[in-house]
Image (spheres, coloured by chain):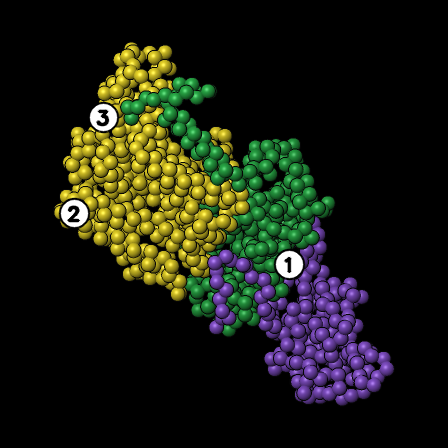
């Protein structure tokens, strides 16, 4: 098991990847995805765990997943951080009944694995998500799910779309609770005491 | 009143004492009145003839409009001490009618849109003014009873849902109908705008709007120079004068150049969808095609260009 | 009575343009002299009103300089004391017609003698209306935008432009009637019916229109369920025909007391009392049917009414205010129905004052403010006028009372024939 790419903020190199979607609206999910995501590869974070082990001289050492997993036998029943040791301590997994190997590819920890067994690059993780989250994936394709910035009129400028894992931690994808920080200051509207 | 005694005054020879006293009284009265209304001088000096006699937006020809924009830009630069401020006036794009939709299943009431609007549109800092209010509503009803936008607790709260409300750019806008001086109107791209230099501040539109979408400048907005958004539009986010109405304009200084509105870009949940209603391939049309949408207070016949929907 | 430094003049010369140019300025001058002459009590009264007016003018000037932030209005309750008083004042102006109708349609001679008081009341009240709207404007300096042909007058779409027309029209109509009657009486002539009776007939219709249009201003707003009622215009008229006549009754009683030369006959007062006996009950009936309709069906559209009647979610600032108004109206109605009350000036003035205050509450703050509470998004922000608003409003009331006092003071000797171009009677 490894600590993988995306929004999981274990290491310093984890930057949200951003999908650039042209106006044509071609599918970014299964199939066509790889080609478009290739352009992002250079910018995507290096995978692996950044570790700061006590006594180790080179702090912030980045260790590739395969360093360990090449030599270990995967346990398909592992589904929680408590089952793991070394790098995975403290990892919160709250994602339905999924186990680690539902998504991670035991035969190549540098990739993810679709339900049918095909491997898929980390950059195309949306393809993996879409297997279960079809309605969201369909909405995403139509531009109805997920945040974006830039241009509504893509003939005039670029639109940057967020990927699934920019907003959803793949290990615990529910949106985190937030606290509103900005409120109108209405005169004569007494600040209500904390709500029920 | 039969007395007709005359007193001799050097100047007013032959004036009755009563008349003289009346004169003194009148002079005192006029003086007192002048003193009473003297605070008016504080504002009278700030207004130039060009500003005072500026024509209605729709009556300005190209040359006059340029002069007005140049004057406003100069004033804005001087006020903020910044040379990067521009005041533009982007026209509607032919073939474009803007519409907005919000996914209420996704919106969690965090209010990032409220703040983004506040900053983008150079709102008054003292009142946290914004064109958006996010209502917290009890689940179990789509009525607005029990609505509250002042909540500060963690969101989403259990058994609540959230509904951001801003101007719906109605196709049958009650606010436009009631304005006595045509200071507010609907543009060709569907955006309801206000000519801040024409509004007389009667607030009839604010009473007429069923969605609390209009705001009044109860005082001159205060925006620290370093926080001023320099990209300003005549009908949108230039800093408003005191005493006039303002409202959401779908960030027309951005959207008329093809950009997304500030509130949409700020939304961390991706609940907001914006686009051209006349383009069959636009996201907003996809919402109408694939989602069951509703508009707020449909029974009033305002025909909003702003839709809400739920995923689940 | 001798006035000012007036010299006896020769009888009115034959009318001609030259004569007019000579007579009319002299008429104005004598009116001005007359207006500023009086007893010590008169001077004290006018000085007090002037003082209040000056305080109001100062408060308004500061409001213009600092912005409407000086008021306690908000984006939630965006109209307050000013517009509440405006609405009431339109009713007062329209209420004067309750003297005109008996005088001109029913040829009540006693009423005819003093009908000008109703018309002068209309003038003062309309001037107050215009001032109350002006002080409510965020940009009074831009009033010219509202002028037809010069600005952009959104007629006939905006009800506010209708209001501008009917209010100013009513002002002109009454100025014409009063001015014409006073001037001809001053010249010692019989007013020619051709020149004013058609205008009087028009003024009757017009009086109805000013209050109907003002009601449409509110009832046309679909987003404000409390106002969005077909009963609003009839209610406005009914309450106007209470507040106008009671104010005139009280004025007549006061004028008698201060020894006015106007021929104030008991029968005129009795006619007005009879009118109030009916209108005050109609007004209460309409109020009751509003209350019933709002409360029996329930629903969120009735939230404003529930806020007004009983309070909502712990907010109830207007509840005592509203029930005070209802109490005053009911008590006044009962008093008016007791014959003995109308017989004594003292008790009649009390009944009038109660009815007047009751309507002021019911149609003023009791109607305008709850229209905004809860807001259209069902948030509750309450409202209480600021000191600035009270001062400005008081200043306008003082100005209106000054206008009314002076105009009666001028009109009385002219109409009673004690002052004319041909000298003192």
> Residue A33 at what x, y percent from top left?
71, 66
How many neighbours does mark 2 have within 10 angstroms: few (below 14), some (14-19), or many (20 or more)? some
Q: Chain of mark 2?
A: C
Badge 3 or badge 2: first in the primary sequence: 2
Q: In the image, is A5 to the left or to the right of C70? A: right
Kindly indicate which chain is depicted in yellow in the rendered structure. C
Q: In the image, is C299 to the left or to the right of B211? A: left
Q: Chain of mark 1?
A: B
How many neighbours does mark 1 have within 10 angstroms: few (below 14), some (14-19), or many (20 or more)? many
Name which residue lies at 67% across and 38% down: B70
Kindly indicate which chain is depicted in green in the rendered structure. B
Q: Which residue is mark 3?
A: C416
Kindly indicate which chain is depicted in purple in the rendered structure. A
Where, by quadrant of the figure, is residue C186 drawn?
A: top left
Q: In the image, is B308 to the left or to the right of A133? A: left
Give the label on residue B265, or none: 1
Q: Which residue is mark 2?
A: C341
Q: Chain of mark 3?
A: C
Mark 3 in CB contact with mark 2 (< 8 angstroms): no
């Amino acid at each position: 098991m490894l600590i993988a790419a995306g929004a999981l903020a274990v290491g310093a190199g984890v930057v949200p990847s951003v999908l650039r979607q042209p106006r044509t609206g071609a599918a970014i999910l299964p199939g066509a995805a790889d080609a478009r995501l290739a352009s992002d590869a250079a910018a995507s974070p290096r995978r692996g765990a950044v570790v700061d082990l006590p006594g180790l001289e080179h702090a912030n050492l980045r260790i590739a997943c395969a360093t360990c997993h090449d030599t270990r036998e995967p346990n398909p029943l592992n589904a929680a951080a408590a089952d793991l040791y070394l790098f995975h301590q403290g990892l919160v997994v709250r994602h339905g009944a999924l186990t680690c190997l539902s998504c991670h590819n035991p035969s190549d920890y540098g990739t993810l694995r679709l339900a049918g067994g095909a491997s898929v690059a980390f950059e195309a993780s949306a393809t993996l998500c879409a297997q279960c989250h079809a309605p969201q994936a369909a909405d995403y394709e139509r531009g109805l799910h997920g945040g974006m910035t830039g241009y509504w009129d893509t003939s005039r400028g670029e639109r940057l779309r967020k990927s699934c894992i920019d907003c959803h931690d793949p290990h615990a994808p529910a949106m985190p609770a937030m606290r509103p920080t900005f409120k109108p200051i209405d005169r004569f509207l007494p600040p209500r005491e904390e709500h029920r | 009143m039969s007395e007709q005694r005359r007193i001799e005054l050097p100047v007013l020879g032959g004036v009755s004492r009563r008349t003289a006293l009346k004169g003194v009284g009148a002079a005192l009265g006029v003086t007192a009145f002048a003193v009473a209304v003297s605070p008016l001088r504080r504002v009278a000096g700030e207004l130039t003839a060009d500003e005072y006699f500026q024509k209605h937006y729709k009556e300005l020809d190209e040359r006059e409009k340029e002069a007005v924009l140049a004057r406003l830009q100069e004033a804005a630069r001087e006020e903020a001490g910044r040379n990067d401020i521009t005041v533009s006036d982007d026209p509607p794009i032919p073939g474009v009618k803007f519409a907005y939709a919000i996914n209420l299943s996704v919106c969690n009431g965090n209010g990032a849109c409220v703040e983004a609007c506040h900053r983008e549109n150079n709102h008054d800092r003292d009142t946290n003014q914004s064109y958006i209010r996010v209502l917290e509503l009890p689940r179990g009803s789509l009525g607005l009873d029990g609505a509250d936008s002042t909540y500060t607790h963690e969101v989403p709260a259990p058994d609540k849902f959230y509904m951001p409300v801003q101007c719906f750019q109605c196709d049958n806008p009650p606010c436009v109908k009631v304005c006595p001086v045509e200071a507010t109107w609907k543009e060709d791209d569907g955006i309801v705008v206000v000519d801040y230099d024409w509004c007389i501040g009667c607030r009839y539109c604010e009473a007429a709007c069923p969605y609390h979408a209009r705001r009044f400048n109860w005082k001159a907005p205060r925006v620290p120079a370093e926080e001023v958004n320099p990209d300003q539009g005549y009908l949108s986010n230039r800093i408003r004068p005191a005493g006039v109405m303002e409202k959401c304009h779908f960030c027309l200084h951005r959207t008329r150049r093809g950009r997304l509105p500030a509130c949409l870009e700020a939304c961390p949940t991706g609940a907001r969808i914006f686009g051209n209603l006349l383009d069959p391939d636009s996201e907003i049309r996809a919402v109408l095609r694939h989602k069951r949408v509703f508009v707020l207070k449909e029974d009033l016949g305002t025909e909003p260009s702003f839709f809400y929907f739920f995923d689940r | 009575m001798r006035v000012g430094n007036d010299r006896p003049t020769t009888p009115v010369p034959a009318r001609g343009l030259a004569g007019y140019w000579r007579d009319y300025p002299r008429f104005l001058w004598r009116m001005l002299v007359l207006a500023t002459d009086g007893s010590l009590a008169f001077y004290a009264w006018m000085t007090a009103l002037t003082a209040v007016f000056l305080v109001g003018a100062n408060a308004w000037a500061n409001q213009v300089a600092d912005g409407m932030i000086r008021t306690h209005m908000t984006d939630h309750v965006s109209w307050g004391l000013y517009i509440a008083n405006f609405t009431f004042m339109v009713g007062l102006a329209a209420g004067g017609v309750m003297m005109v109708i008996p005088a001109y349609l029913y040829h009540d001679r006693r009423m005819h003698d003093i009908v000008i008081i109703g018309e002068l009341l209309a003038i003062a009240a309309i001037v107050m209306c215009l001032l109350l709207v002006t002080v409510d404007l965020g940009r009074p300096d831009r009033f010219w935008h509202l002028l037809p042909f010069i600005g952009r007058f959104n007629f006939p779409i905006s009800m506010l432009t209708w209001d501008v027309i009917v209010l100013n029209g009513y002002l002109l109509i009454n100025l014409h009637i009063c001015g014409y009657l006073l001037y001809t009486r001053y010249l010692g002539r019989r007013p020619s019916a051709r020149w004013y009776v058609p205008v009087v007939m028009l003024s009757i219709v017009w009086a109805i229109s000013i209050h109907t249009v003002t009601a449409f201003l509110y009832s046309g707003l679909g987003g404000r369920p409390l106002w969005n009622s077909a009963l609003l215009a009839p209610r406005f008229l009914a309450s106007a025909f209470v507040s106008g006549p009671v104010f005139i009754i009280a004025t007549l009683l006061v004028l008698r007391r201060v020894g006015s030369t106007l021929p104030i006959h008991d029968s005129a007062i009795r006619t007005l009392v009879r009118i109030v006996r009916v209108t005050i009950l109609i007004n209460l009936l309409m109020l009751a049917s509003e209350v019933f309709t709002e409360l029996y069906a329930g629903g969120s559209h009735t939230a404003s009414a529930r806020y007004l009647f009983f309070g909502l979610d712990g907010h109830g600032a207007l509840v005592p205010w509203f029930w005070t108004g209802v109490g005053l109206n009911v008590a006044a109605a009962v008093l008016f129905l007791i014959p003995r009350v109308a017989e004594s000036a003292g008790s009649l003035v009390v009944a009038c004052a109660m009815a007047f205050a009751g309507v002021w509450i019911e149609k003023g703050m009791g109607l305008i403010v709850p229209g905004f509470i809860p807001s259209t998004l069902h948030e509750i922000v309450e409202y209480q006028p600021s000191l600035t608003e009270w001062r400005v409003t008081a200043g306008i009331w003082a100005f209106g009372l000054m206008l009314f006092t002076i105009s009666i003071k001028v009109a009385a000797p002219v109409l009673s024939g004690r002052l004319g171009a041909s000298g003192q009677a």
